[in-house]
Image (cartoon, helix red, strand yellow):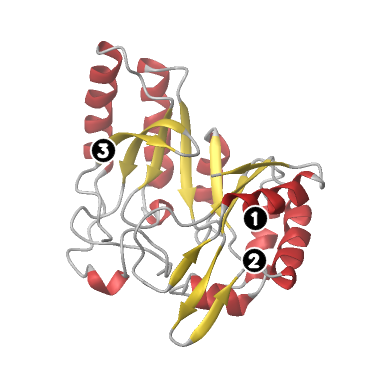
Amino acid sequence: MTSLYDNIIFGPIRSRRLGLSLGVNLLPIESKLCSFDCIYCECGWNADHPGQRRFNSREDVRTMLDATLARMVAEGTPPDVITFAGNGEPTMHPDFENIIEDTLALRDKHAPEAKVSVLSNATQIHREDVRRALLRVDNNILKLDSAFDATVQLVNKPQGNYTVARTVELLKMFGGKLIVQTMFLRGEYLGQRVDNTTEEEVSAWLKLVAEIAPKQVMVYSLDRDTPCQTLEKVEKDELRAIAERVEALGIACSVA
């Protein structure tokens, strides 16, 4: 069963990719707000959560994060990472850059060893303020699930104008200071076959990865409930085979 995060600060949780992760949700607590409507999203469909569309305020985020970090450090369990994720796309927040500024200051104050990570679908990186903020965090993790627009439309269901070509050009602007994250899956949606693990898909995706030249790639598959019930998880050995092809490009690749 898909579910929303019910607070501004959530966790800490043991992340498959990031370690002991303290989550930050900039999106509404009782609804989902996202520029994608992915068929695999653990928060469910956008239309299932039509509640109040209000971003959490910069002040509330800063106050709650300050208190939580102070408590975790006092208890001897500082987080490995502070992760921006939550009920949608964090970089949609109009005050995203200032919130990152606050978070880095609080991290330095309470838990200087902790990393700051942002999980993003890359739909807002045309905004200079978002790019500036993402370049300041430790783990700038940006989604690219396919090299083909048709697959992106089927799997990610972007809510605005989105093309892979434009996104790749913007990703290249990070000069390698980013992590590309890709969900691999197969199955069926609305009577159409879904599979971004075919040789055609993987080969085209690898060409774009080489072009973007990120510092790292993360490949993963389904681990939680999805709103589309006819999807299939890609097993670890298959993901590792894809990772080996990334590593052959001279780019580090992790499997989760």
Question: Dots 3 and 2: beta carbons under 8 Å?
Answer: no
CA distance for labels 1 and 3: 34 Å
Q: Secondary structure at mark 1?
A: helix
7 left or right of 147 in image: left
The residue shown at (31%, 65%) is: 44
Q: Nearer the viewer, mark 1 or mark 3?
A: 1
- Identify the mark at residue 9; answer none if there is no mark: 3
Q: Secondary structure at mark 3?
A: strand
CA distance for labels 3 and 2: 35 Å
- Identify the mark at residue 238; answer none if there is no mark: 1
88 left or right of 249 in image: left
Q: Nearer the viewer, mark 3 or mark 2?
A: 2
User: Mark 2: few, some, or many residues within 10 Å (few <14, many ≥20)?
Assistant: some
The residue shown at (71%, 63%) is: 205
Relative height, residue 56 to residue 146 (above, below) = above
- Of the two numbered discs 2 and 1 on the same chain, state the one appearing first in sequence: 2
**Residue receiving disc 2:** 197
Q: Nearer the viewer, mark 2 or mark 1?
A: 1
Question: Dots 2 and 1: beta carbons under 8 Å?
Answer: yes
- Identify the mark at residue 207; answer none if there is no mark: none
